[in-house]
Image (cartoon, rainbow, N blue to C red):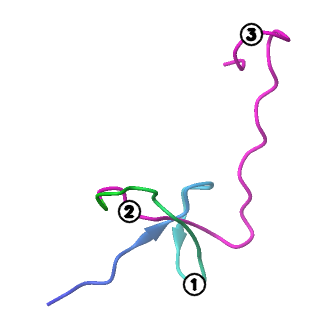
Amino acid sequence: MTYPVRRWCVHCGRLIEGEAVAIPGFSASGARPDAYRHPTCRPPAPRPRSHPNGPAGR
């Protein structure tokens, strides 16, 4: 017996019950499965740099 796979949104963390956008896992071995998000969820904006030449702020 197989069970349906529950898909969780990688941006908001909520369960996806309807349509989903797949984000490929980019794994040559197949070890990393695809990620999913709601069609209306957008990735968070990148953090501003704390210093013009330094790494991104935390």
Q: Amino acid at mark 1?
A: Gly
In this picture, residue 46 sits left or right of residue 7: right
* Rendered view: 35 above or below 54: below
Tell me the quarter of the picture where residue 28 sits.
bottom left
Pinpoint residue 38: horizontal percent, then vertical percent. Answer: 64, 70
How many C-alpha atoms fall within 10 Å of the one at disc 2: few (<14), some, or many (≥20)?
few
Q: Which mark is residue 35?
A: none
Return the residue at label 3.
54
* Rendered view: 9 above or below 46: below
Q: Nearer the viewer, mark 1 or mark 2?
A: 2
Q: State yes or no: residue 46 in magenta.
A: yes
Which label's residue is closer to the chain start, 1 or 2?
1
* Rendered view: 9 above or below 2: above
* Rendered view: 58 above or below 24: above
Pinpoint residue 10: horizontal percent, then vertical percent. Answer: 55, 56
Residue numbers of the magenta segment: 31-58
Return the residue at label 1.
18
Q: Name the outermost residue toward the front.
A: 28
Which label's residue is closer to the chain start, 2 or 3?
2
Tell me the quarter of the picture where residue 13 sits.
bottom right
- Residue at 82% x, 25% y is 48
Q: Dot 3 lies on which element?
A: loop
Return the residue at label 2.
33
Q: Amino acid at mark 3?
A: Gly
Whole-number angstrom distance, CA of label 2 to CA of label 3: 33 Å
